Amino acid sequence: MSANINQRQNKPSTKFIFITGGVISGLGKGIASASIGKLLESQGIKISLMKCDPYINVDPGTMNPFQHGEVYVTDDGAETDLDLGHYERFTAAYFSKDNNITTGQIYFSVIEKERRGDYLGKTVQVIPHITDEIKNCIRKTAKKQAPDVLIVEIGGTVGDIESQPFLEAIRQLAIEVGSENAINIHVTLVPFIKTAKEIKTKPTQHSVGRLREIGIQPDILLCRTEKNLTEDAREKIALFCNVEKNAVVQALDVKHIYEIPLRFQRQGLDRLIVKKLRLKARKSNLRLWESNVMLRLKKPKTKTTIAVVGKYITLQDAYKSIYEALVHGGIANNAAVEIVKVDSENIEKNGADKYLKNVKGVLIPGGFGKRGIEGKITAVQYAREKLLPFFGICLGMQIAVIDFARHVCGLKKANSTEFEQKTPYPVISLLEEQKKVTVKGGSMRLGLYPCHLQKGTNAYFSYKKEVIHERHRHRYEFNNKYRDLLVKNGLLISGVYRKDNLVEIIELRDHPWFVACQFHPEFKSKPDQAHPLFKHFVAQCVEL
């Protein structure tokens, strides 16, 4: 009798869904995880999500966008994997540094403990010390955030050396919490061979085989495919992968990623998860998601064209949150947004008119480094002079200040000290506290800061409140030594961080909609709740 009481007392309050991937990378585990989170939330289940990245970098903050894609920033200033952006866009949850761990963080922590003598002279090994550290991080997040379900996505592909400690850790954790409290969902590929005109299940069989070799039996398979799975294919996958037929879920390619939760729901994925984890859930309700998001995406009443001018244009994931926030702005205005991706170096070579003459608005996103800067400055000048709606974000604001100083205030050699240290007019300069920084990782101005808005401005009209809180990721700031001169010539300071008197938002007095901000509003935009600045920027582009 006492043993049964102890078992009930030790029963974990949080259940776990472990998401793994096989065959190839890039199958969309992050979006699948976010979609599952959305489905469970729609049933009244409290969720959180976590990403385990197998690279040795401590975080992606120092990685080139071409290597990793976008660096996503949380309220508490953590530089994280871009999948946390998917998690926040799809769900109502907000995340912190605890929701993203890397191999680098895990080893860093274990080595620090070894140096302190925490292991009492033991030989430190991958098992149990590294795997225990991974499990502790997962358990800590579950305890701290107390969700009903914690969805844990394992980065990489089954079979990769880098992912093995994470897979071993979740294998152990699943045993420790019991089969009623943890399931594995494996995302795999079912390719379509055009010459044979048939889909092939063998890659999925091999992927599941590799997973089972390390002791993990998937409970559900999400089969990424460009063609509908036949009943024969489902039966074959179920038979050879040792899962129920209804647990073989089709993850068909879709035009709009926000349709994925609805596709999963129609196949009963949410009901299957609830059953396997023995969760208490109400009937799923995605009516508003379907009507307010999907209907407007599929049947918009109008359309517009917006240019995004950057230097990482060739990589879709480099500006992932920017692109999604523009889509959200379109949803809010019942408009389709066609995004024209413009490489700023091409503007340097061929001028702005060739690339921007047919667009209705111009957006310049964040970034680092000198390459392509002059092309961005030319793009800002074009939008300013042609009275095109303009939206600058982070570096985009700094570029707008440089353009205004050069071409309106007559400071011909105005620049940022990031690009020209000896510029005679450093209108953008390094923060005083940044001048002593030698370690690059995690040392920028990061995370949530308050901003006071000036009434009567476009920023105030967008937010409709005096104080806002937005996420930052930068080292350089507006130089207040040039503030009076720029304001005298028509620059409007519409948002300020009062504690340090830092300029956060600028506008132009004689322009219909020219807004640039030092923070990253794209990180707080959702398909059913567009960020106010993106909503009103797109609205201006639609009206042209």
Image (spheres, helix red, strand yellow):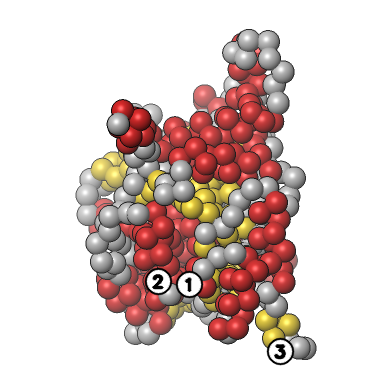
Query: Camera-side residue: 20 or 301?
Result: 20
Q: In screen coordinates, is 291 left or right of 63?
A: left
Residue pictured at 46% horizontal, 43% vertical: 178
Labels 3, 2: front one: 2
Measuring from the top left, give residue 87's x and y in whole percent.
Answer: 44, 54
Q: Are marks 1 and 2 in contact (CB under 8 Å)?
A: yes
Q: Amino acid at mark 3?
A: Lys
Residue 476 to residue 228: above or below: above
What residue is disc 1 on?
246
Residue pictured at 62% horizontal, 18% vertical: 112
Q: Quadrant of the N terminus?
A: top left
What residue is disc 3 on?
197
Disc 3 versus disc 2: distance between alpha carbons? 28 Å
Residue 162 to residue 293: above or below: above
What residue is disc 2 on?
268
Q: Amino acid at mark 1?
A: Asn
